[in-house]
Image (cartoon, rainbow, N blue to C red):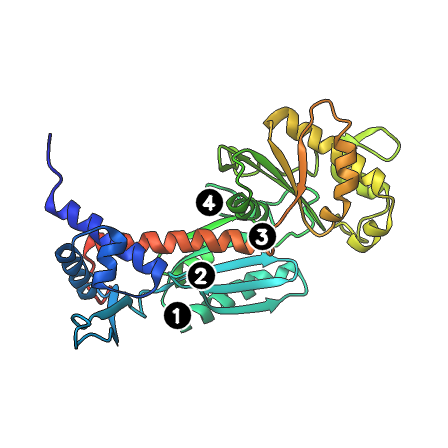
Amino acid sequence: MTKPSQELLRSISDERVLRTLMAARKLTRAELAIETGLSKPTVSESVRRLVESGLVADTGERTPGGRGKGRVGSFYSLAEDVGVALVMTIAPDGVTAECVDAYGDVADRTHHPIDSPAEVATVLPSVAAKAVAAHHVRLCTVSAADPVDRRTGRLVHLPDSPFLVGELDPVEVLSPLLHGPVVVDNDVNWAAQAEHAVLGVADFAYLHLGEGLGCALVSDGEVRRGHSGLAGEIAHVITVGPSGTAMPFIAVFGELGLRRPGSTAIDVPRLRAADPDVTARAVGGVITALVTLADPEVVVIGGTWGPALLDAISAECSRLPRQVDVVAASVEQPSLTGARAAALDLLRTALVSRAGSRTPRSG
């Protein structure tokens, strides 16, 4: 059996030390040895390498030590300039940017309101450029309230999508500003990932019921995006209309007069004042299709008006041929939360990879 190389062992040790510091923020070498289970000499060598690479730094803090208290210990933490991840959301109310450090803290946040989707093309690079000017941004995740082509990250036009940004390629726009990758996904997919982290269920459907209609399917713990990334676009799923006839889901709101003038966006205040049973019946038809095709254990209801109709939707689902639990979404700002969690994971992985490649301090 071939023994692992010394380089591989060093890489494993460095990763364990780095990830332990990411979780604990600052530790002495003795504490690192306890937390990682590595020997003190191994930890000392790992810390030395990580300091030389610019990933770890001596904080200047010392343990008391002396007079029977043992040797003085130095506290180490991640270096201040290791970089951050940029998290951006494109939504009807504007563009939001957060800079998240490797501890998971939001180091900076800005929101730029917009009056129309057409403004996104200029606001997005402007907001990103300000974040990059203030921080060492290594990578970016983007949440968009539009369908997203999974192969390219471009926003996709579909009939009856209420928030149409236009021909926009966030990867193309943002990549020149950054040192790393740009990952773009639909806002409902990000929301489902955030819900998965707290739900503890591997197979569920996430229904977004707000000004727009969307769905994310999670199977075996993974969001299923489909061939081109458009899985879960439920606006044209056939369901039960107000008069009992079959029609596309989005058309139900037109029949009920619950669309905003000149738009397919749903008028949420008017919907809340309408008969919930008719709307719940249409939602029940969509859930029937989801249960039939995807067999989720739970259907999570999110969005601006969906959770408020949970009782009516649950009552409707209780009459379906195949039963499924229906629960309200529990994560606040779900799309941003999901994109932020992914950005943090990518940032930590990037730092570990840098340690493994022995990138010099200036990298």
At 80% from the left and 39% from the top, the residue drawn is 252
- Give the image location of residue 121, x and y in percent: 56, 61
Q: Nearer the viewer, mark 4 or mark 1?
A: 1
- Give the image location of residue 288, x and y in percent: 70, 28
- Tell me which label, 2 or 3, sits earlier in the chain: 2
Q: Which residue is mark 2?
A: 86
- Give the image location of residue 72, x and y in percent: 18, 73
For the residues marked 4 and 3, what is the alpha-carbon distance in whole angstroms?
A: 23 Å
Looking at the picture, tell me which residue is in the foreground, 134 or 106.
Answer: 106
- Tell me which label, 2 or 4, sits earlier in the chain: 2
Give the residue type at disc 1: His
At 61% from the left and 45% from the top, the residue drawn is 157
- Tell me which label, 4 or 1, sits earlier in the chain: 1
Q: Determine contact: label 2, label 1, CB under 8 Å.
A: yes
Q: Nearer the viewer, mark 4 or mark 3?
A: 3
Q: Which residue is mark 1?
A: 135
For numbered disc 4, what is the local secondary structure? loop
Looking at the picture, tell me which residue is in the foreground, 53 or 311.
Answer: 311
Q: Determine contact: label 2, label 4, CB under 8 Å.
A: no
- The relative height of residue 113 versus residue 217 in the rendered view (above or below) is below
Q: Which residue is mark 3?
A: 334
